[in-house]
Image (spheres, rainbow, N blue to C red):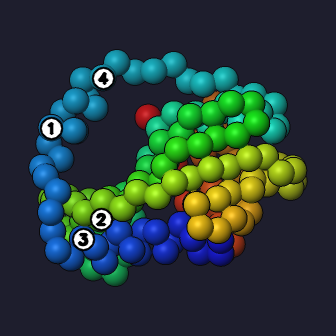
Amino acid sequence: MKHKLLLIALAATLSACGGGGGDDSTTAASAQSAAPQPAPTVTVAGDMTKYAGTWTSVCMTQGQQTVRMSLVLTATQKSATGRMVADAYNQANCGGPSAQLSIPFNASFAEMSGNAEKLSVSDGFETGAMLATFSADGRSLTLVDGEDTFAFTKN
């Protein structure tokens, strides 16, 4: 799965060339009106329940386009399942219409690697390893896939 997340972002970026999608102002307005959620409790290593929820990356530049990725996951103590969604935009700062790519995302705890959890991750086509670390408050998640690092914030 080396560079898997980067490939997903790149594929979404390339699909954005055709436009599509809609105005994000409705989504932004509803996100602003949502009540803040309490910070999750960070649990012990190997307990996958801490991955549950929606995690969103910052807007990333990929060539002349921009991409924002989200992980939408449900979890049990043993596994996290859901989707990785990449929204690609032709405009800077993830603005304007977007094209979306969504793939399955399944992860289970493999072992500890220093202060990171080593996860076995599958996208439905291949399985590989990723390292995952959380901020002390459990609101930030960092995934490392080979040489690529992706930072997500809990919505």
Q: Amino acid at mark 3?
A: Ala
Residue type at numbered disc 2? Ala
Type of amino acid under label 4 = Ala
Q: Position of residue 46 (x, y in %)?
A: 81, 38
Residue at position x 76%, y 36% in the image: 78
Question: Can you identify the residue that label 3 sits on?
Answer: 16
Residue 38: where, in percent of width, then height?
A: 51, 19
Q: Earlier in the sequence, mark 4 or mark 3?
A: 3
Q: Is residue 30 above or below residue 116?
A: above
Badge 1: how crowded within 10 Å, few (<14), some, or many (20+)?
few
- Identify the residue under disc 1: 26
What amino acid type is highlighted by mark number 1? Thr
Front-most of 151 and 104? 104
Frontmost of labels 1 and 3 is 3
> Most extreme residue toward the bottom, as rendered?
63
Residue that numbered label 2 is attached to:
88
Q: Which residue has dot 4 on it? A: 34
- Per the model, the C-alpha gap separating discs 1 and 4 is 12 Å
Residue plotted at (17% across, 74% down): 18
